Image: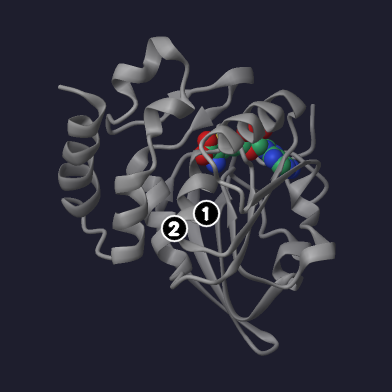
């Protein structure tokens, strides 16, 4: 089986098959070459139904989780989105297929550089990456139509709530260091309406409004 066949199988069995219906998300997942976002020895596993290790003890999330979190944002095209936790850059590429501009923050400079180089090579010119503490958001470009946090947090970081546009959605795993609930939060004027989507397990969000570094 080649990578294109593996991607199609992933789409049918793990994405469509597990209930993802959003056509924007399905189209994005069918385009992005996930095997390019993992090291060569793991490429054969890139379309399997689980997360994979990347540099520095971090992970590229399970394909279904990437699709589910993207679906929660309800993007239709033309949006400005903030991602916290660039990691491999795969989720940023999925967002970049739908949104107008993607701002992504990664605390590990090595991961940020590698993701930046790969996304440039794959011609994702609408992704801007910076090294920093994503729990503080990115005030310069706020407010955002969508904010996605791809690491587990003890609380919903306050700056991210503040940087969400009216009608915008924030998706964030919230809980303990070993288990979180995926929360989808929608801003309606000054009110935030929040909904639990499912249980999940992410690597920790380390920063000012997340877990403190040991
Ligand atoms: N979205 C990534 C992808 O598609 O490969 C997966 C991200 S991985 C599960 C979580 C990432 O969050 C790690 O790369 C980690 O270094 C990063 N991270 C943790 N705390 C952070 C923070 N405060 N600001 C920015 N990045 C953070």
Give the colouring mode of the picture: one colour
Say which residue label 2 marks.
Answer: 70
Where's residue 206, x and y in %?
Answer: 73, 38
Is ligand 1 less than 8 Å from the beta carbon at label 1?
no
Where's residue 76, x and y in %?
Answer: 43, 73
Residue 74 in view in this figure: yes
Q: Which of 6/83 is in front?
A: 6
Residue 202 in view in this figure: no
Q: For the residue carrying disc 1, how many other residues have a C-alpha within 10 Å: few (<14), some (14-19), or many (20+)?
A: many
Q: CA distance from mark 1 to mark 2?
A: 11 Å
Say which residue label 1 marks.
Answer: 96
Q: Are dots 1 and 2 in contact, CB under 8 Å?
A: no
Where's residue 136, x and y in %?
Answer: 80, 55
- Which quadrant of the picture is home to ligand 1? top right
Give the quarter of the figure containing the N terminus: top left
As drawn, the label of residue 209 is: none
Q: Is residue 8 above or below residue 95?
A: above
């Amino acid at each position: 089986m080649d990578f294109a066949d593996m991607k199609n199988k992933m789409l049918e069995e793990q994405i469509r098959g597990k209930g993802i219906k959003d056509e924007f998300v399905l189209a994005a997942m069918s385009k992005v070459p996930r095997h390019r976002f993992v090291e060569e020895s793991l490429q054969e596993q890139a379309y399997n139904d689980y997360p994979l290790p990347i540099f520095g003890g971090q992970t590229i999330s399970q394909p279904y989780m990437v699709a589910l979190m993207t679906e929660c944002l309800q993007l239709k095209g033309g949006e400005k989105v903030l991602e916290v936790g660039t990691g491999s850059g795969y989720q940023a590429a999925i967002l970049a297929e739908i949104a107008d501009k993607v701002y992504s923050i990664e605390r590990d400079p090595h991961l940020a550089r590698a993701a930046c180089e790969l996304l440039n090579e794959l011609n994702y010119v609408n992704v801007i990456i910076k090294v920093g503490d994503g729990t503080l958001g990115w005030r310069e470009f706020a407010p955002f139509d969508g904010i996605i946090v791809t690491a587990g947090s003890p609380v919903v970081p306050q700056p991210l709530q503040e940087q969400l546009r009216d009608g915008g959605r924030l998706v964030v795993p919230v809980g303990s260091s070993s288990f979180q609930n995926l929360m989808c939060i929608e801003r309606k004027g000054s009110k935030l309406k929040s909904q639990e989507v499912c249980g999940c397990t992410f690597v920790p969000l380390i920063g000012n409004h997340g877990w403190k570094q040991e």
